Image (tube, rainbow, N blue to C red):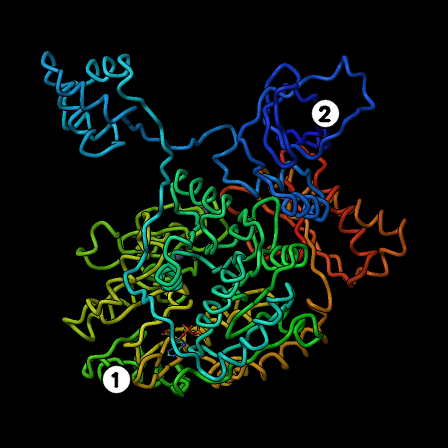
Amino acid sequence: MYCQVIVDIVHENVARAFTYAIPEEMKVSPGQRVAVPFGSREKEGYVLALSEETEYDPLKIRAVKRTLEDYPAILPPMMELAREMAEKNHCPLAETLRLMIPAEMRGGRIRVLTEKWIDLTDEERARAAWSAESRSRKRKAILEMLMTGHPRRLAEIRERVPDSREALNKLETAGLIIRTEQEILRRPGTPLKSGSGEWHQLTPEQEEALEEILPAMRNGEGRFLLHGVTGSGKTEVFLAAARKALEDGKKAIILVPEIALTPQMVSWFQARFGTEAAVIHSRLSAGERFDEWRRIRRGEARIIIGARSAVFAPAENLGLIVVDEEHETTYQSDHHPRYDAREVARSRCDREGATLILASATPSILSFAKARRGDYMLLEMPRRVQDRPMPEVQLVDMRTELETGNRSVLSRALSSALISCMQKGEQAMLLINRRGYHSFVSCRACGHVIKCPNCDVSMTCHVDEMHPEDGGPTQLQCHYCGHRTPIPEKCPSCGSRYIRYFGAGTQKVEGEVRKLLPGIRTARMDIDTTGGKDGHARILEQFRSGEARILIGTQMIAKGLDFPQVTLVGVVAADMTLNLPDYRSRERTFQLLTQVAGRAGRGRRPGQVIIQTYRPEDPVLKMAARQDYRAFFEAEIQRRRTSLYPPYTILARILIESPAAADAEGAAAGLGQAVRAVLDARPEWKKKVLLISSEGPGIRMLRGMERRQILMKMLTGSETEDFCAWLAKAAEEPRAGCQICFEYNPTSMI
Ligand code: ADP
Ligand code: ZN
Ligand code: ZN
């Protein structure tokens, strides 16, 4: 017997299967991982297929050394998925296969954890030996322990009978005891203690949604977009659908944007499904990740909750994939090989006969457009559960505040709303989409803005987290590379002492809130406060328990949180995301504002939202204030059609990075020429290309690397796909001193 093996090396030259012989006594099946000789070394590989014969000279074929696990790590549909992704990404199969297993399994960096146990061979004999035992107190004690209960953990015996090694050896030689080993599974803890295990009585809207979903699940089909306003109870719909999958003997995968930010979702699932629920995320230890993966692989965990990589969970007999908050950009991976978890989910559901549900209160323009075309069935839940009202949203013009002499980051309206919210004993959330104290520093005399030496971005002022009691900001930080330096006393450019600070961040807002409401506990949630394994959970727990009354944070606080005591939400500066140079900035702003507004009034008391802005007349802000998704969608899709942005076109870029500006320029110029030349040679490609630009990117230096790009806008079609394949190949050709990558509809345009 022979097998075709994909060797786990990512290199063009070995991006094909190699044939190995399978030794007589070895059992190998497709998808299994094996160790094979490769050149003079031993490598890991994945078995693609088996064959009885081979076209190669059997004498020259080397043999598989051993199997790495006794089961296939890659299930057949996952193998097909890996192939499809490799083809689409123009990358070696070895690379996409790596997505399917925990990273630490490769190279044997993680092992099955076992525990040693001791058992009796025969109770009668043990009893006799115990009675007869008069020489060794230790042997007698061990036998006694086992007679009252066996098997027992070796560790337990060692603890109760110190220095027992020799006694155990003697008992073993006498055939009285045997040693065994048992696997133990490392399990991650529960993130938040708010989960209730009760099933709610469904609302009519939830029932209606399920009336469409459940029959589709029975038939192993159905692609749904569940558009439900914030607080409409979408989670309850997934929970019911997941339960149905389980009842049918199937598995369900629930994807969330980021586990740390959605601890409530996890706790709801854990409370309802107990150990049948597995949780996968980036903060697990290697051992926990490996063991959760194995629990899923063996079918012990049948509901999988995780961030985007959980879409690759080795669940056999899949019945359902849910993508919650489907509009979130975290579903697109920006590491190589790139993938979009929503597309992978779709592909898995098609292949494995499962139902797909994408859900959001603010679906992405692309998904909603697909639903309108009929690619997804649209399910709408336009009302909150129990007829709770949607929060009332007010736009506050910050220009008027300035004119009337209010220089605080909090408008009068927001200040008084905060005060009255606290007086009523309720809770509030404040969103400010930048961390730190001030967003930038510039010189009054010459206008110089202090920038990071490694990046072409302005530095942000920070209060030192270690010594916050010292008061104001003392430090400058770069939010891209982490570079830190003390705030200079003089302008580095002209020496003037007049340095001014602009823009507010989370630290500044927290400071002002504390001044406004002394004695009220606040909690701040941003990258600076959420380090460590359970940084997020700790802060959210403080807020959930009511210990902190006001939660101040970046967009981290906008996602999926459900705190019924929150009646006031303030957005400190709504314009911030709107001004970003990206064709999606309107979409992102609308989503962020609607989502954060949706955190208010989720309990019995109605919610109030105050959005501060310098552009209250902006139509996007007005639609967000009305929480009118439909109106926003219509306006935005119209704009995309007329200005030719996705989904009407495809954006692609080649990004070139190099420590030396000249190298980056050279490579960009060379690639630009090659692109133009190939287009001249292929008119069928050229007619699809609307624009080629070598301006940008937005940040021309990042982490010490000079960056240049070639940005292309193209019409869709098979010719465009072929052109993109050519671009991906062209980007792979090495160019001196440069890192080059090809991005198809890049997540970020910076
Ligand atoms: P969404 O994700 O749509 O914003 P959630 O799923 O978080 O909304 O639900 C909002 C709140 O309503 C949660 O506290 C949830 O427990 C509660 N809820 C959901 N469905 C019901 C129901 N049928 N009856 C009572 N409460 C419900
Ligand atoms: Zn100056
Ligand atoms: Zn930097």
Q: Is residue 85 left or right of residue 409?
A: right
Q: Amino acid at mark 2?
A: Tyr
Position of residue 52 measured from the top left corner of the image (x, y, whole percent): 77, 27
Residue at label 1? 416
Give the total of numbered labels: 2
> Is 447 placed above or below 705 here?
below
Which disc number belongs to residue 2? 2
* Disc 2 to disc 1, C-alpha distance: 77 Å
The answer to the question of whether label 2 and label 1 lie on touching residues, with beta carbons closer than 8 A, is no
Q: Quadrant of ligand 2?
A: bottom left
Q: Nearer the viewer, residue 529 or 22?
A: 22
User: Mark 2 or mark 1: which comes first in sequence?
Assistant: 2
Direction from residue 737 to residue 489 in the image, left or right:
left
Mark 1 closeness class: few <14, some 14–19, many ≥20 residues within 10 Å: few
**For the residue marked with disc 1, what is the amino acid?**
Ser
At horizontal 39% and vertical 45% (from top left) the residue drawn is: 284
- Horizontal side of 195 relative to 663 (left or right) equals left
Q: Position of residue 68 (x, y in %)?
A: 54, 28
* Viewer-side label of 2, 1: 2
